[in-house]
Amino acid sequence: MKIKRIAHLGIAVKDLDAGKKLYGANLGLALKGDEVVESQKVKVSFIGVGESNLELLIPTADDSPIAKFLESKGEGFHHLALEVEDLAGALEELKAAGVRLIDEKPREGAHGALVAFIHPKATYGLLLELCQYPH
Ligand code: ZN
């Protein structure tokens, strides 16, 4: 598989506006807009850092995975996303290598991306997202 870059770091927050104020006004980074991802029950806000981004995440429902994360661990680092050229192919490679996956098939993420998560048990505790953007 070919990994192109760190696409984003996901950070779970309880107050999106406060997070945007910190990274936008205080740190001077570019706010790139919000988007609700219905399938994952989250609202995300992207903040540009060079060729990468920060992705602030807040839950849109009580049964959102991010709501559960905030409840058990509090605010903070949630996942790392790597951009790949061919997500379906990457997942096939990982499956064949016996790497434990959360998503065996690509699903829809923010910004029209296809995304899939690798299980943290396979990555030394890191929740790793692979994503593929349409070009
Ligand atoms: Zn993400």
Image (cartoon, rainbow, N blue to C red):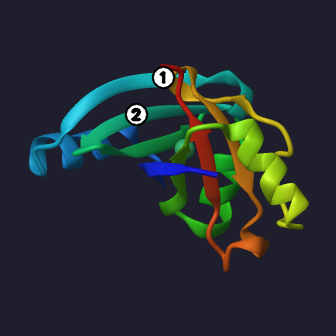
Work out whether residue 100 or residue 57 is closer to the camera in this orientation and state it. Answer: 100
Left or right, 98 with respect to 94, comes to right
Residue under label 2, please give it.
45
Query: Mark 1 vs mark 2: which is more N-terminal?
Result: 1
* Residue 8 visible in rendering: no
Work out whether residue 59 or residue 84 is closer to the camera in this orientation and state it. Answer: 84
Quadrant of the rendered image holding ligand 1: top right
Amino acid type, label 2: Ser
Pointer 1 and pointer 2: residues touching (CB < 8 Å)?
Answer: yes
What x and y, as percent, mark residue 115? 66, 37
Q: CA distance from mark 1 to mark 2?
A: 6 Å
Q: Quadrant of residue 85?
A: top right
What x and y, as percent, mark residue 104? 86, 45
Is label 1 in a helix, a strand or a loop? strand
Is label 2 in a helix, a strand or a loop? strand
User: What numbered label is drawn on residue 112?
Assistant: none
Residue at x 50%, y 23% (from the top left corner): 111
Task: Give the answer, above or below, for where 134 lies relative to 107.
Answer: above
What x and y, as percent, mark residue 94? 79, 58
Task: Give the answer, above or below, for where 103 lies relative to 76.
Answer: above
Task: Give the answer, above or below, for where 79 lies relative to 126.
Answer: above
Residue at x 41%, y 24% (from the top left corner): 34
Residue under label 1, please give it.
35
Badge 1: residue crowd in 10 Å (few <14, some 14–19, many ≥20) = some
What x and y, as percent, mark residue 23? 22, 47
Residue at the extreme front of the image, as rendered: 1
Task: Give the answer, above or below, for where 128 lies relative to 44.
Answer: below
